Image (cartoon, rainbow, N blue to C red):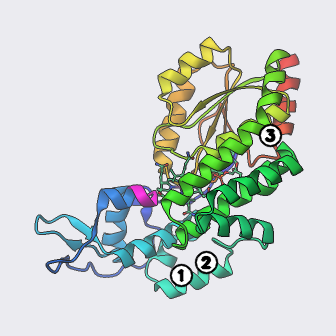
Amino acid sequence: MTNTSEQDFDSDSASDGAELPEPVPPRAAPSGTTGIGIGAIAQEIGLTKDTLRVWERRYGFPQPMRSPGGERLYPQEQVTKLRLVKRLLDAGHRPSKVLGQSIELLQQLAESSGVGQDAPDAELDHLISLLRASAYDEFRFGLLKRATRDGLERFVLDVAAPLSARVGNAWAAGTLQVYHEHLFSEAIQSAMRTLMRPLSDAVRGRGGRPRVLLTTLSGEGHGLGILMAEAMFTLSDCDCVQLGLQTPLHDIVDAVAAHKVDIVALSFTAVLPAQSIANGLTDLRNLLPPHVRIWVGGSSPALRRKFNDGVHYVAGLTPIDETVADWRQSAML
Ligand code: B12
């Protein structure tokens, strides 16, 4: 990995050395008050429980209430703020600069730094409004029409990728729900598979190389990144083996041997803690034969850090063609 980032908020390094407030004594939850437990919050937002405890101790936020049994309970407004905090940190802001701010200030900061902002596109807005209105058949029709009109590459780059970001932003803003995300994923997957199938079959018939295995590691439940990457690899004449989501490391290793795979391509969003990604990649690297490359992509800020050698970060979908060309050149030497 060549890129580095100083951002790391997974453990005690969740602090960045700024002035710290006095610790706030825990409040008991008034009877009848609801709150969300630390495990559920950590999972939903993509932080570790340790990070939440460290922030509480060092920055005075979040400030959970306590259940009668002494467990942390986070009220909804703190969850909303935490979601926003996480997105600002993913965009490169520092914990000490954001954790003490009001939600209104954080919203302004997000707006001024472009976090969660959609580029104007009336057609994509229309698709989102169909999804929101539960006009699912219309939404699927709209996607398929665009896919047929644009072709695979343009559909991936101009529709599937920006629409995923829009859906994510709408979910974060509370204007789409998780079931909308599921419906969206199903519709995108089906449109992309329909477009991709004839080409994939033809590439397979020609014995295209490299052979690329695509999957995600345990804990990473987002599959549109590897699907879009598969489309771009296929357009670069690669034979793709799509394993889907969350494949255990030993199963990846077995599939690599059985299918004579040259490259393992993995996708990471910001949900997996940086340390889990680093550990997973180190373990996988040690388990795979050295000639098998590991290429990683996706929006996780952890990918901007330096990992061990033998893991290559591909910064987006368009560089896939060039990276494959480099592989072919080195394979011929
Ligand atoms: C659909 C969706 C879901 C679906 C996924 C269904 C499925 N089968 O895939 C469901 C509903 C299950 C879901 C669940 C969750 N999600 Co969700 N989800 C999304 C959404 C809208 C798209 C997901 C996706 O596949 N993205 C991956 C690709 C498309 O995006 P990318 O990482 O930016 O990668 C780009 C490139 O780098 C490249 N690329 C990607 N991978 C690779 C790999 C290689 C090798 C290469 C070369 C290139 C490449 O392609 C992309 C093109 O733009 C995103 C929004 C978004 N912006 O991504 C949120 C998002 C990822 N989800 C989010 C969250 C919080 C969750 C949940 C924790 C809570 C929830 N919403 O229910 C759970 C966690 C699940 C888990 N354990 O992983 C957050 C993560 C934020 C964060 N900082 O942690 C996001 C960003 C929404 C948001 N704006 O807050 N989600």
Image coords of residue 312 (percent x, y)? 69, 37
Query: Looking at the image, which is closer to me, 325 or 259?
Result: 259
Q: Quadrant of residue 240?
A: top right
Query: Taking 63 as reference, is 239 left or right?
Result: right
Front residue (pair 249, 59): 249
Q: Report which residue position mark 1 lands on.
A: 106
Name the image quarter holding residue 326.
Answer: top right
Q: Position of residue 187 (x, y in %)?
A: 65, 49
Q: How busy is the neighbourhood of tag 1: few (under 14 within 10 Å), some, or many (20 plus)?
A: some
Residue 321 at x, y percent in the picture: 85, 38
Q: Residue at x 51, y 78 (%)?
A: 97
Please give the residue where the numbered disc 2 appears in the rendered image.
Answer: 110
- Examine the rendering and report whether any part of residue 113 can be seen: yes
Residue 213 lies in magenta, yes or no?
Answer: no
Kindly state the secondary structure of the residue where label 1 is placed: helix
Q: Secondary structure at mark 3?
A: helix
Dot 3 beta carbon under 8 Å from ligand 1: yes
Instruction: Write the residue at 53% across / 81% down.
Output: 106
Task: Tell me where the magenta segment starts and ends, as one range.
Answer: 43-47
Instruction: Indicate the amino acid at tag 1.
Output: Leu
